[in-house]
Image (cartoon, grey):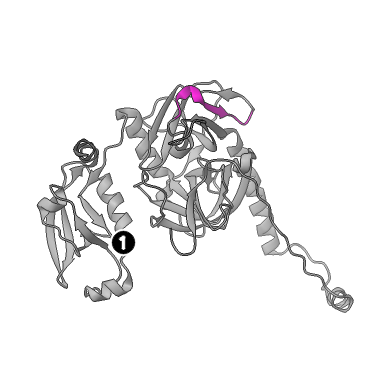
Amino acid sequence: MNRFFKTMLLGGCAFGGGIAGTLLLNHAERLKAQTSRPAPVAASANALGTIATGERFEAVIRQMSPSVVSVEAIKPPAPGKTKPIEESGSGVILRLDGVPGIVVITNNHVVAGARADQITIHLADDKIYRPTKVWTDPESDIAALKLEADGIIPAAMADSDRTREGNWVLAFGSPFGLNRTVTHGIISARDRGQVSLGSTIRIKDFLQTDAAINPGSSGGPLVNLDGEVIGINTAIASHSGSNSGVAFAIPINLVKRVVRQLVDKGSVSRGYLGVHLAQTLEAVDAMKLGLDKARGALVESVYPETPAAIAGLKGNDVILQVDGLAIRNENHLINLIASLPIGQRVKLQVWRNKRAEVIEATVGDWNKAQTRLKAEK
């Protein structure tokens, strides 16, 4: 949580409203506006552009609608409670390379803990299905539901690495239980990671958008104007719990990598080093350490008997590069190391005692480390 917003996942159902303002002109102002108005002319280039954009929106909505679904799940009771949790969200039908058949992609937090027979998928034609299999990855908040049905239309997908700030996008979902809702906006930023979303979500690499997204939109697709899915809507930053123009979507390229591993191996292999990193490297701290830029990942502490400890990393080190790739921040480092093969040797450029050093480390197995830690508790 930062000082302005709390960031929250988007499952569930709520109700909200809005206020519109009207600007009133007095009689003299209206008369002046009427008499000074130029004669009608052919539609301007801007007007034509607006019409073209509106028609593009309509075409994308028509193309995407059969592939967007709503998802409901009956989840186990919260600790200390006896009543099951009813969760609602959204999803999108996809066909992924390397994954047999059709899957519905949604967020893990929508279906976490629910069995396949406790999950309902509502299609655009009002048909209802149960998934035949469920795969989940809590660390990236991704879930895949195997769907076996005839006449299913999967959505097209884009290369989300090619998405840029300012691109128009449409967000599809079921906010507040209102199925087949569509909103529009732009990509506000890429590679967002400084977002607190709970203890289980560790892999954070979000597209940020100002498209209106609200509770119940979790798992719905974020789509470009070519009608291609670029992300899965996941969270909002808000004072009130409703849309504030700051929303986050998981890039579809990350979704594809995670789901392929889930289907192929049943889990996702991830690398780790074994360091506790500062959430941000503040400018004032960077200057104290002798850096001229507030970039890199600041090591607060090193866990014993980990690849980082064996490599000789220390507290107050700033990891600037991995194999020559500049590290932007702590989340960039986590995602990069997590994506590397287990056992790979990497060269870390480290800022220590106001000078750069190179340290070699071996990428460890995050899943095995977690199993060991649980056994030691």
Could you say where residue 330 lies in the image, as x and y percent from the top left?
30, 58
Could you say where residue 349 lies in the image, as x and y percent from the top left?
17, 61
Secondary structure of the residue carrying tag 1 is: loop
Does the image show residue 324?
no
Q: Judge from the rendering whether residue 328 lies leftward or rightward of residue 101; answer left or right.
A: left
Vertical placement of residue 186 versus 104, above or below: below
Q: Quadrant of the N terminus?
A: bottom left
375 or 356: nearer the eye?
Answer: 375
Instruction: Return the residue found at the far front.
Output: 80
Q: Judge from the rendering whether residue 70 lies leftward or rightward of residue 95; answer left or right.
A: right
**Residue at 47% across / 48% down in the picture?**
249
Q: Which residues are magenta?
A: 114-125
Q: Quadrant of the C terminus?
A: top left
**Residue 141 location, quadrant:** top left
**Residue 89 location, quadrant:** top right
Identified by mark 1, the residue type is: Arg
Does the image show residue 237?
yes
Magenta stretch contains residue 12: no
314 or 95: nearer the eye?
Answer: 314
Task: List the residue tagged with mark 1.
Answer: 328
Badge 1 crowding class, 10 Å Cα cut-off, few under 14, some 14 to 19, many 20 or more, is some
Vertical placement of residue 2 versus 158, above or below: below
